[in-house]
Image (spheres, grey):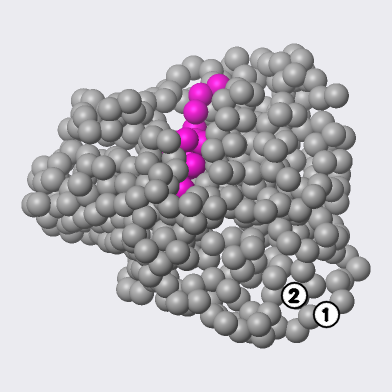
Amino acid sequence: MTKPHNQSLSATRRRFLKSTSALAGAALINGGIHSHVTAQNEKPKSPNERLQVGAIGLRYQGTVISVQARQYADVVAFCDADQHVREQARSSFGSTPRIYEDYRDFLEKSNVDVVLIGTPDHWHVKMAADALRAGKDVYVEKPLSLTIEEGKFLREVVKSTGRILQVGSWQRSDNRFRLAIEMVRAGRIGKLQSVDVVLGKNKQGGPFKQVPVPNNLNWDLWQGQTPDMPYIQERCHYTFRWWYAYSGGQMTDWGAHHLDIAQWGINSHPVEITGTAKYPTVENGFDVAVDFHATYKYANGVTMNVADNGRNGIMFNGSEGRIFVNRGTIAGKPVEDLESNPLPREDFAVYDYDNLERPPRAGKLDAITNHMGNFFDCIAARRDPISDVESQHRSVTTCHLGNIAMRVGRTLKWDPESETFPDDADARDLMRRDQRDGYEVS
């Protein structure tokens, strides 16, 4: 049985938490103020003072976030269903971390304090929930969930366990996107009227050849909750995102980033969604939408358009101007005007989550420039991080709503308070998926 977190930490680690608990600012979390500390500015701790971290899913992003995490903690364990992946990851860390095939063994035996999850999307919620209930703090890659119901479930687990969960939607910690939100909230484009988001095309491909499962891969474990299918190499690793069973295509891949920022600026929830898409019919081929478009109407009157063609990024359109932002650019006349008319810095933007229609006070968002650092800051301070479970559940819900509207092919009404489609049973059915025995998300 896993010990409670406050018993499993050594006294030296408790001293680490206390030593880094001085507050250094405030971060806007889905519009609200949450304090955090600056552990990334501290001198490195001795080995017996550092938290112990383990990572699940190392093919790409899991290794990336492990490298980021070892600035703040000791990476001591790796887990992956692919033997080659987990051994390669361990060798890149000097053969020090212990390795596991099954994440359940990893959670039981690795004795880590923090779990990083870089698996395909269909594993995010179950692994995160199991880790949280085992007394671990969790950093999980985006998108947070495979379905809307999964996200609602994980939100309750975070609440009941009191653990810290950060989602890898790192654009919230990027100065360009943060500045765009500051300016929209400050009224620098007048009243926000619409937002245009471009995500990029889904990949097409197939038919792909069925081949024997490689000896190094536990295919049954990799599939998890999803239907048991014959092994096709293109189902696995990076290209999993172009199969509906494991992901949602660009709507959840890029959408988990860009729709999150768009909705951060809109400061409301969608109430009506229309989607159009074409779907490939190639057997044993990628099956997410070939062409897609979604339109959202928000409770505060703002409209958001999401397309797969055009310049990747987000355009905020207001009554007195517009701002475009992506990972390389923030542009528009209001941005140019900052040189002569900078934003006021005497106050933070404050969001009243209980009253979505109430305008926030405008001001400067705290300058979080290190997403992983923010996570470890919040572990120390026991505060919600910049990409907390509520904001990221709501953001990826918006992504799922677009995919659902595309699949049913009609305009849908969404109740953001009860989080359901009140008048459409077909759409409600798509809020969840069947799960294989032994891998249920519960």
Which of the 4 quarters of the picture holds residue 258?
Answer: bottom left
**Residue at point 64%, 61% (across, down):** 246
Pointer 1 and pointer 2: residues touching (CB < 8 Å)?
A: yes
Task: In this rendered view, identify the residue nearer to me: 138 or 376.
Answer: 138
Q: CA distance from mark 1 to mark 2?
A: 8 Å
| Amino acid at circle 1 | Val
Q: Does residue 46 show up?
A: no
Which label number is shown at residue 305?
none
Task: In this rendered view, identify the residue nearer to me: 252 or 88.
Answer: 252
Horizontal arrangement in the rendering, residue 20 relative to residue 231 (left or right)? left
Horizontal arrangement in the rendering, residue 283 relative to residue 39 (left or right)? right
Image coordinates of residue 169 in percent, x first then y, are 49, 48
Q: Does residue 298 show up?
A: yes
Q: Does residue 2 sit above or below 68 in this rendering?
A: above
SS of the residue at dot 2?
A: helix
Residue assigned mark 2: 233
Q: Which residues are magenta?
A: 382-397
Residue assigned mark 1: 211
**Residue at point 43%, 23% (across, down):** 35
Q: Is residue 244 magenta?
A: no
